[in-house]
């Protein structure tokens, strides 16, 4: 008999939130494909090396996933970067660094979503989840490119929700606060910086990747079939202050 389990594609699934999400969705019974620059780090059925900002590579990946599984039910646009130390306030951010951040954080979700939408339309259903950030809702000081890119990613998720709801496709954004991942660990390893970060979070600590993965697991559940166009904020109460 054919395998009727749902299929999820997770970008940036080799570490941090992406790796935790891949493991969580596998536990939920999904068949998993991971797109990453270092895919062998991901716990998945199908791991593919690709750059999400490269249109040709993204199209190739989607065809590989379809050849392996025959369908795509969920896309998690998780791959993202914060930019180097040079990506700071606007007038000090090099143009090429701005472009690099937007290539991964905005162009990446656009290309991946664009590639899977015809598949989901043909199926008559699908769900795109874009991992944005609370930086898409409130500005992170000194991180102009990152803040702007996450705001764009959030609005992109809303745009997809509006345009494809009639096709049975949902689109939502997950907006984490500070999460203990390789991207943030350098800051959290400095006691005074960690204290400064956690002092602004009502719960009093940063999130773990598994906690964001749990939220994504809930979002893709059939129990929330009416939810689309939402910004699912998971920040320990930070933006409620």
Image: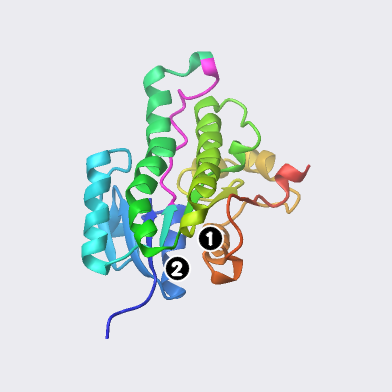
- SS category of the residue bearing label 2: helix
Q: Is residue 80 magenta?
A: yes
Q: Give how far apart the Cα atoms at labels 2 and 1 are.
A: 9 Å
Question: Closest to the observer: 13 or 118?
Answer: 118
Res. 216 mark: 1
Residue beneath label 2, please? 25
Q: Magenta segment range?
A: 77-90
Circle 2/circle 1 CB separation < 8 Å:
yes
Location of residue 211 with respect to 184 vertically, above or below: below
Residue visible at 51% across and 64% down in the picture: 220
Q: Is residue 35 magenta?
A: no
Residue 33 can be seen in this image = yes
Dividing the picture into quarters, in which one does residue 147 lie? top right
Residue 215 lies, in percent from the top left, at 58, 61
**Quarter of the image that includes the N terminus:** bottom left
Residue visible at 23% across and 66% down in the picture: 68
- Label 2 CA crowd tier, 10 Å (few <14, some 14–19, many 20+): many
Residue 60 lies, in percent from the top left, at 21, 50
- SS category of the residue bearing label 1: helix
Question: Closest to the observer: 111 or 146?
Answer: 111
Residue visible at 54% across and 46% down in the picture: 162
Query: Magenta region's main secondary structure?
Result: loop
């Amino acid at each position: 008999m054919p395998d009727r389990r749902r299929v999820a594609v997770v970008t940036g699934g080799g570490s941090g939130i992406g790796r935790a999400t891949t493991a969580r969705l596998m536990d939920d019974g999904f068949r998993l494909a991971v797109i990453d620059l270092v895919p062998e780090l991901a716990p998945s059925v199908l791991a593919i090396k690709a750059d999400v900002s490269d249109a040709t590579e993204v199209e190739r990946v989607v065809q590989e996933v379809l050849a392996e599984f025959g369908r795509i039910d969920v896309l998690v646009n998780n791959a993202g970067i914060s930019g180097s130390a040079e990506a700071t306030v606007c007038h000090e951010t090099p143009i090429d660094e701005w472009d690099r951040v937007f290539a991964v954080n905005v162009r990446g979700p656009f290309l991946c979503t664009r590639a899977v939408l015809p598949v989901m339309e043909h199926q008559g259903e699908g769900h795109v989840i874009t991992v944005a950030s609370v930086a898409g809702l409130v500005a992170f000081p000194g991180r102009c490119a990152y803040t702007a890119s996450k705001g764009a990613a959030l609005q992109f998720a809303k745009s997809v929700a509006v345009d494809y709801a009639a096709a049975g496709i949902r689109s939502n954004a997950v907006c984490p606060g500070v999460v203990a991942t390789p991207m943030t660990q350098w800051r959290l390893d400095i006691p005074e910086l960690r204290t400064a970060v956690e002092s602004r979070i009502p719960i009093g600590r940063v999130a773990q990747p598994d906690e964001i993965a749990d939220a994504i697991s809930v979002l893709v559940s059939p129990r929330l079939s009416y939810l689309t166009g939402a910004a699912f904020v998971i920040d320990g109460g930070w933006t409620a202050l």
